[in-house]
Structure formats: structure tokens, C-alpha cells
Image (cartoon, helix red, strand yellow):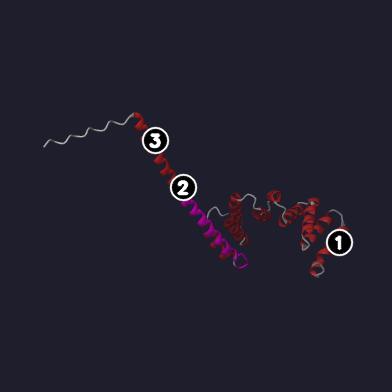
Amino acid sequence: MSAPLSKAPPPPPTAERRAQRLKQKRLIISWVAVLLVVGLSWEVYDYYASAAARAEEQVREAAKLLSPGNYERAVPRLDQAVETDPTSWNAYFQRGLAKQNLDKLDDALADFDHALALKPDLVEALTARAEILRRQGNLKRAMEELTKALEFKADLTAHYSRGSIYSELGQHQEALADFTWVIEQSRDAPFAYFARAKSRRALGDEEGAVADEKKGNSFNRGVVR
């Protein structure tokens, strides 16, 4: 019986074939890399989305405590919210309000700074920060904050606060304009009538001052609804 014939070795791949195989390997590696990146990105997104949702829930729970006598209890919950999601401007803002009401003014300013770094058009934070600066005697900086806030949005509190600072600085014409704007926007503003009366009197308008005081007092008597 004759021995079986041995098979001849396959011919070596041509340069073209080798290049094609290399191209296929690179394509497979590229697709694997893309899938890994997409998968990792989704995991990261899901993690942060979940963190944001958890933080917002913690903020909502803490917001229920933002009332006299409860500010101390609100702060630890807002600390948790900040730790859960360091990108939550609302957590920083609400914690700033709590600390402001606890007279921890420097800490409150730091929180408002964080909130504004994350959301520069947060008018409420600008207004709150201005109030702290005013209490600290930095009227110029407080005025700048309120003017910046009003560039973003017309706001009753910002206009009234700025008017009050103008009045403190003796700039009663400017104060008058801010108080008048508040009165035009809100019928329930006895405080604005009294503030405007002070500025009118300083400007020599005694008749207008008396009229504003009368109007402001009418709220207390229930005349204005």
C-alpha cells in the first residue's frame, strides 16, 4: 500500500491579502473601542442623572424645613444634596438661604457664589447675595449685584432692594424710580409706598409724600385689597 501523498503547504499570503487582514483587524478593534466608550458614557450619564434626581429629592425635603426654627435641621440635608450632586445649583442656593437665616453670612455668600457659578442668571441668588453685602456695609457691591440681577429679569425684590440702597446713599431720584416700578407692578406693596414717601419728602415733594403715606396706611385698615 502506497504512502499517502503529503499536502503541499498553502502559498504565503500576498501583500495585498496581509493588508486586507490588517485592515479588518483594525476595523474590529475600532468598533470594540466605540462600543466600550458608548457603554462607559451611558454608565456615567446614568450615574450622574441618578445623582441629580436624588439630590433634587433631598433639596425638596430640605425646603420643607426652610422656616424659622428649622433652618438648623435643613442644613445637614442640603449638605447631603451637595455631596450627592456637586453640580446642583439649587442645593447650593437653598443651603445659602438656610445659612443666611442663621446669620452665617460668609458661609451663605460662599454657597451663593457656587450656585451662581453653576447658574449665572439665578436672579434670586444675586438678590440674596446683595442683601448680605448690604448688611455688611458694602453698598456699592450690593448695588452692582442688584443691577446685574435686573439685567437678567425684572424682579420686585431686586427693584425694591436697589431702591432702598439708593435711598441710603441719598440718591432719591433713582430710589423713586425703583419704588414706583414696584408699586406699578404690585398693588399689595405698602412698604413701597412708605419707602417712596421718604424719597419724595427728601426731594421736597411733601404733598406726594403725604399721599404715599396715606396710601400705605390704607393697607393696614383693609381699604386696599
Is residue 33 or residue 207 the one in the foreground?
A: 33
What residue is disc 3 on? 23
Label 1: state its secondary structure.
Answer: helix
* Residues at circles 1 and 3 in contact by the CB criterion of under 8 Å: no
Could you tell me how far apart the alpha carbons at marks 1 and 2 are, in whole angstroms?
Answer: 69 Å
Q: Position of residue 69 (x, y in %)?
A: 61, 68
Could you tell me how far apart the alpha carbons at marks 2 and 3 are, in whole angstroms?
Answer: 22 Å
Name which quarter of the figure residue 134 lies in.
Answer: bottom right
Q: Does any portion of residue 92 appear in the rendered image? A: yes
Residue sitting at x 54%, y 62%: 77
Residue 38 marker:
2
Q: Residues within 10 Å of mark 2 (few under 14, many from 20)?
A: few
Q: Position of residue 167 (x, y in %)?
A: 77, 54
The stretch in magenta equals 41-69
Is residue 57 or residue 166 the one in the foreground?
A: 57
Tag 3: residue type? Lys
What residue is disc 1 on? 211
